[in-house]
Image (cartoon, rainbow, N blue to C red):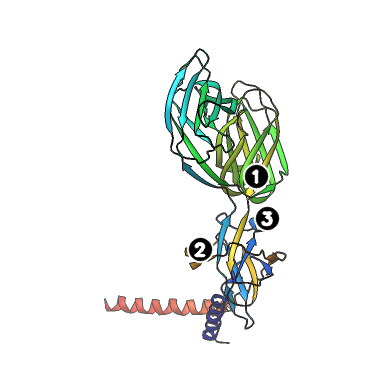
């Protein structure tokens, strides 16, 4: 076989790989079953996240037609995260008053729309108040909506925390009255009354495989978590057994890399979330969905005794592909290519045409994609004696030209 023939064969090989949609450049595939309509839904299983890039750009849907041609099916990646639609509701502050027990603020809502959260804009920096919220249609008969409801603000050298949202069931009254029992005058600069339409997130629960709580670090509690597998995480809940009041700064990090040293394995971390672990709210932390396996939670205790950590709940949004199939064939979900770029499909610009209800496809077992070996190009000189002979001839020719030039000079 001549060298020219070998190069031509190599060229045709690469041309074939390109023509077949580069499926061979991915590491894994799962066969898709149940394709019966142009549009279907594929819920990504946990096994996929252990092998994909963090940005999920290396996911493709390839099909093999009856003519052995490769087809690429476009898809739209979607998370089942929480959707909030907040709409401001018009209101008027009717009056403010006080007596020996409390300060009162009365609002009128001219529309008949129900409301959910009320955010109080208070200028006071440090307070701990138990308030009461009432509703009425005529300002004569009042109905209690919230009672002994705690709002709090702490600002000092170690802690900055504020909670002034009144979360209540949907209420539909014309008048609302807020009473704040305090000897200190509340500086209520305003209140935002909102109508919140919420579509709850659809979470997957991820069991924590290992949890280690370390209280030996002075002024801190360090919690190390291992989820056993890489999964897309977006929610953590810290379960605290103490019934006392507490407000502790907290930071959540995840492992991005590790190196082996003489003193053992060292981990590199990146920030995931931070806030205040406290006894008022539910200690739920929501953050941008990130593929993680190992995490570390740090709680600043300062001069307080450590809290009793009873457990950690980990959840993540479901990921699904909305895929369009236009040609018959055997289709595969392929993934695992760190050099893949983000796919760009026309369907991302025409989402209104995607049906609202889609049938889920079934997924076969993950299979390792066998790589086609690139034919090796044989060297021009297999025997090193020939190589040294050629080099010797070149040296002699160069020497002859050099001597000739010196004689002429």
Among the 4 quarters of the image, the one containing residue 356: bottom right
Of tags 1 and 2, the one toward the viewer is 2
> In the rendered image, which residue does mark 2 sit on?
352
Which residue corresponds to the image point at 49% horizontal and 40% vertical from the top-left? 112
Query: Considering the numbered disc 2 on the image, is that residue within a helix, a strand or a loop?
Result: helix
Real-space Cα distance between discs 1 and 3? 16 Å
Residue 394 position in % (x across, y down): 44, 78
> In the rendered image, which residue does mark 3 sit on?
46
Of tags 1 and 3, the one toward the viewer is 3
Query: What residue occupies the far top of the structure in this picture?
Result: 100
Q: Is residue 344 visible?
A: yes
**Comes first in the chain, label 3 or label 2:** 3
> In the rendered image, which residue does mark 1 sit on?
294
In depth, the one of 201 and 25 nearer the eye is: 201
Real-space Cα distance between discs 3 and 2? 29 Å
Which residue corresponds to the image point at 52% horizontal and 81% vertical from the top-left? 7
Q: Are marks 1 and 3 in contact (CB under 8 Å)?
A: no
Query: Considering the numbered disc 1 on the image, is that residue within a helix, a strand or a loop?
Result: strand
Q: Quadrant of the N terminus?
A: bottom right
Residue 126 position in % (x across, y down): 49, 21
Q: Is residue 158 visible?
A: no
Residue 264 position in % (x across, y down): 66, 41
């Amino acid at each position: 076989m001549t060298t020219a023939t070998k190069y031509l064969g190599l060229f045709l090989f690469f041309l074939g790989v390109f023509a077949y949609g580069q499926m061979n450049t991915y590491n894994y595939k799962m066969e898709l079953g149940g394709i019966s309509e142009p549009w279907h839904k594929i819920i990504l299983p946990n096994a996929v996240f252990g092998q994909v890039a963090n940005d999920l750009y290396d996911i493709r849907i390839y099909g093999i037609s009856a003519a052995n041609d490769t087809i690429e099916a476009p898809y739209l990646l979607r998370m089942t995260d929480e959707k909030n639609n907040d709409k401001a509701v018009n209101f008027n502050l009717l009056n403010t008053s006080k007596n020996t027990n409390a300060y009162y603020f009365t609002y009128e809502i001219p529309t008949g729309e129900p409301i959910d959260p009320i955010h109080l804009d208070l200028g006071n920096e440090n307070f701990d108040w138990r308030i009461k919220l009432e509703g009425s249609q005529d300002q004569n008969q009042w109905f209690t909506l919230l009672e002994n409801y705690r709002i709090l603000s702490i600002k000092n050298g170690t802690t900055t925390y504020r909670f002034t949202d009144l979360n209540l069931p949907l209420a539909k009254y014309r008048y609302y009255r807020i009473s704040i029992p305090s000897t200190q005058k509340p500086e209520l600069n305003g209140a935002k009354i909102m109508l919140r339409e919420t579509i709850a997130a659809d979470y997957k629960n991820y069991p924590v495989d290992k949890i280690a709580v370390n209280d030996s670090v002075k002024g801190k509690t360090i919690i190390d978590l291992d989820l056993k597998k890489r999964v897309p995480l977006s929610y953590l809940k810290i379960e605290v057994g103490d019934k006392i009041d507490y407000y502790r700064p907290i930071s959540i990090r995840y492992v991005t890399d590790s190196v082996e040293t003489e003193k053992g394995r060292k981990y590199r971390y990146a920030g995931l979330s931070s806030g205040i672990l406290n006894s008022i709210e539910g200690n739920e932390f929501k953050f941008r969905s990130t593929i993680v396996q190992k995490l570390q939670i740090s709680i600043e205790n300062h001069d307080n005794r450590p809290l009793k950590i009873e457990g950690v709940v980990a959840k993540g949004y479901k990921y699904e592909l909305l895929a369009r199939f236009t040609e018959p064939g055997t289709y595969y979900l392929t993934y695992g290519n760190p050099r893949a770029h983000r796919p760009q499909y026309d369907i991302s610009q025409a989402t209104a045409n995607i049906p609202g209800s889609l049938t889920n496809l079934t997924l076969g077992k993950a299979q390792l994609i066998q790589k086609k070996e690139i034919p090796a190009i044989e060297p021009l000189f297999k025997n090193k004696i020939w190589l040294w002979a050629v080099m010797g001839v070149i040296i002699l020719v160069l020497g002859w030209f050099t001597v000739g030039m010196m004689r002429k000079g």
